[in-house]
Image (spheres, helix red, strand yellow):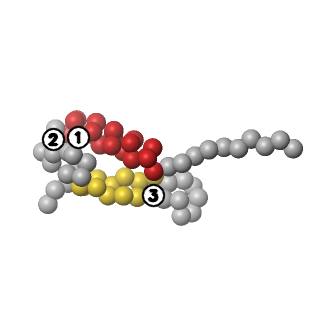
Amino acid sequence: MGKTVTFLVSTNSEGSTLKETFSFGELGIEDDIDDNDEKKIIDACFKDWVWNNISYSYIIEKD
């Protein structure tokens, strides 16, 4: 069985959690990769995942 990593992002609002688990293979990461390289690759994958799964904006209103 290979390694997996779970990505998680949430806000303080109830029900706002997004969680997804990936195998290293799904992310293109070899199971026997060096720990430092593993962290760098997972950090990059996580940042991409977050930016692809969130939406944000703001509205300025005048009275």
Q: Earlier in the sequence, mark 2 or mark 1?
A: 2
User: Looking at numbered disc 1 in the image, what kind of residue is underneath it?
Assistant: Glu
In this picture, is 22 found above or below 48? below
Q: Is residue 6 above or below residue 32?
A: below
User: In this figure, which residue is indicated by the disc labeled 2?
Assistant: 33
Image quadrant in which you'd find residue 63: top right
Residue identified by numbered label 3: 18
CB under 8 Å between discs 2 and 3: no
Numbered label attached to residue 2: none
Q: Which mark is residue 38?
A: 1
Q: Amino acid at mark 3?
A: Leu
Which residue ends up furthest to the right in the rendered image?
63
Quarter of the view holding residue 1: bottom left
Q: Are marks 1 and 3 in contact (CB under 8 Å)?
A: no
**SS type, badge 1:** helix
Residue 37, position in %: x, y?
Answer: 22, 36
Label 1: how many Cα within 10 Å (few below 14, some 14–19, many 20+): some
The earlier-in-sequence mark between 1 and 3 is 3
Q: Are marks 2 and 1 in contact (CB under 8 Å)?
A: yes
Residue 21, position in %: x, y?
32, 58
What secondary structure is found at the residue carrying circle 2?
A: loop
The residue nearer to you, when weighing 50 against 1, is 50
Q: Residue furthest bottom?
A: 15
| Residue 56 x %, y % | 57, 46
- Mark 1–mark 3 Cα distance, whole angstroms, equals 23 Å
Residue at 33% in and 43% down = 45
Residue 37, above or below 25:
above
Q: Nearer the viewer, residue 54 or 33?
A: 54
Label 1 vs label 3, nearer the camera: 3
